[in-house]
Amino acid sequence: MEIGVINSLVNEGKCFDHVSQFGLKVCQLCSWDVKLATKEIAATVVAESKRTGVRVCALWGGVTVPGNQGHWNFQEGPETLGLVPLKCRATYVDGLKKWADFASWIGAPALITHCGFIPENPCDPNYQGVVDAIKDVAERCKKLGIGFWFETGQETPVTVLRTIERVGTGNLGINLDPANLILYGRGNPIDSLDVFGKYVKNIHVKDGLYPTDGDNLGKEVKVGEGKVRFPEFMRRLKEIGYTGELIIEREISGDEQSRDIRDTVENLKKWLAA
């Protein structure tokens, strides 16, 4: 398991110094601005990746829908996030296809995104439309020879598993964010591996606390200070044969973010060696 970090697609693709400052050689490249998904920027990313020796293990692509502000909470989130809301779906699918093209141009093996609050009830009248939309994107990815991976959080593990089975394109996987399962109150990340472990392709190293009210997510905290129980989580990953990347994500900024990332790198080394 190689340790890496989330890295924003900025500076016209000249963006790998953020990774190198931590002595790391792998990242998950992330952007919400589909206008950056050009062949010119892709060429810069490839050149900078070679220059710095930083490998892109996956592209995380989000889509900003005009007139729709996404809300990361329980009240407005289901109607504003991902490709679940019908009003946003066509734009979101189109944007994800552009990100899929970009991922293939930079040599990334997969596209990752949050699909949104996928309905828990498979008989929900909106569920089949969500499955069809995911399949549309997944088929584009498959033609390009890349995977399409769901980041966990807004769905229970069994809903993610069911949806992968229903879409059935053979190139689907999971970017397991253990903190998100806790922040959204969706499940225990260690136990989730019993449900969908065979589909886990990438890990976000992030920690958090459970929600304490019915409207808002729990709080993200420094890795090791939340409810993920990382030493145990790492042992379970080894048990199921996981060999992918461990991508650190700390959703703050500035000096505190840098300190926390450095501490997490050292802790991960200890936990991996245990």
Image (tube, rainbow, N blue to C red):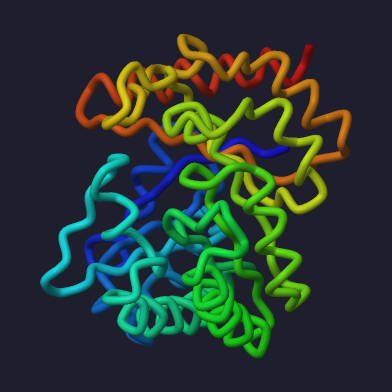
Foreground pick, 154 / 50: 154
**Residue 245 image position (x, y, % from top left):** 65, 43
Foreground pick, 101 / 15: 101
Foreground pick, 146 / 263: 146
Foreground pick, 43 / 203: 203
**Residue 113 image position (x, y, % from top left):** 47, 60
Asked whether, in this view, residue 160 is left or right of residue 13, the answer is: right
**Residue 198 image position (x, y, % from top left):** 82, 49
For image coordinates 80% across by 40% down, the residue present is 242
Asked whether, in this view, residue 1 is left or right of residue 29, the answer is: right
Q: Residue furthest bottom?
A: 143
Looking at the rendered image, the quarter that the C terminus falls into is: top right
Q: Residue furthest left?
A: 67
For image coordinates 71% across by 58% down, the residue present is 162
Looking at the rendered image, the quarter that the N terminus falls into is: top right
**Residue 213 image position (x, y, % from top left):** 30, 21
Asked whether, in this view, residue 95 is left or right of residue 175, the answer is: left
Query: Residue 142, located in which quarter of the rendered image?
Result: bottom right
Asked whether, in this view, residue 182 is left or right of residue 98, the answer is: right
For image coordinates 29% across by 50% down, the residue present is 77
